[in-house]
Amino acid sequence: MSTSTVGRMRASSARRPADAALAMTFLALLLAGCAEEERAAPEPASTPIGDLNTATMQLPRIEFCSLVEDSAIADALGGDGVSEAAYGNGDEVELSGVGRQVVHELGCSWTGEDGASARAWVFARPVSPEFAQTVVATGRTTTGCRTVSGPEFGTPSSTQVCDLPTGRSRVRHAGLFGQTWLTCELEATGRQADALRSRADQWCVAVANGLDAAR
């Protein structure tokens, strides 16, 4: 074997470990880049209440507590809920400021560790636009509450901000989706009005989307 041939063999042998090391380094960098992309991927953004296409949403009048995402409940309450309640059409329910009444609704409520509560309900029967207007007008007379402007939550719809006698604050959205009247609200103590409004907006979006997906 010639000296030149031996030299070429030695050079080739020397390149193989170097090539392998280079390939491993490249693979490690590639995997690290993929992991970084996975970590950097943003969480899906929730739908702003003003972007709800309420004209096309069809909300069924059904028991819907299980349709609301746990994450939406936690976001609304500022933490995991500690209690949950549900009621149906014809049940007797304790109503704030009224006492126990037989209701014609299907509803749910969740309470958090700090006493914050998230609620939602739908009328059990179909609602006409004319009757919906009556509901909106009646809501304007609620003591301690004021109707505020904002994105539509159904047609017609109403948004209320209330300072309750208990010292708590409440934000309520209500509106007509097709023939279904949906009301949702968030109530809390010690939260700034803007923060409570933002939480209530997203809470009502989550409830409406959950019902719309179940049709």
Image: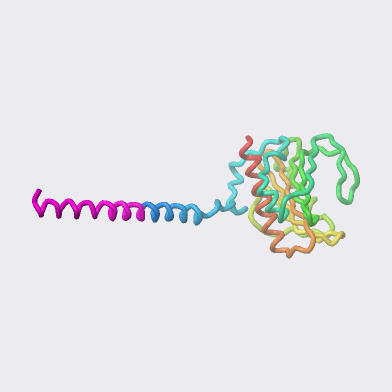
Secondary structure mostly seen in magenta is helix
Q: Is residue 154 visible?
A: no
Q: Residue furthest left?
A: 2
Where is residue 206? Give x, y as percent. Answer: 65, 47
Please name the residue shown 78% across and 58% down the image.
Answer: 188
Q: Quadrant of the C terminus?
A: top right
Where is residue 189? Give x, y as percent. Answer: 79, 60
Please name the residue shown 63% across and 40% down the image.
Answer: 212
Q: Is residue 185 left or right of residue 7?
A: right
User: In this view of the protein, which residue sits in the foreground, 38 or 167?
Assistant: 38
User: In this view of the protein, which residue sits in the foreground, 104 or 23?
Assistant: 23
Where is residue 60? Give x, y as percent. Answer: 67, 36
Query: Is residue 18 found inside the magenta-colored segment of the image?
Result: yes
- Image vertical order of residue 55 relative to residue 151, above or below: above
Q: Quadrant of residue 145?
A: bottom right
Please name the residue shown 68% across and 38% down the image.
Answer: 179
Q: Is residue 77 visible?
A: yes
Q: Which residues are magenta?
A: 1-26
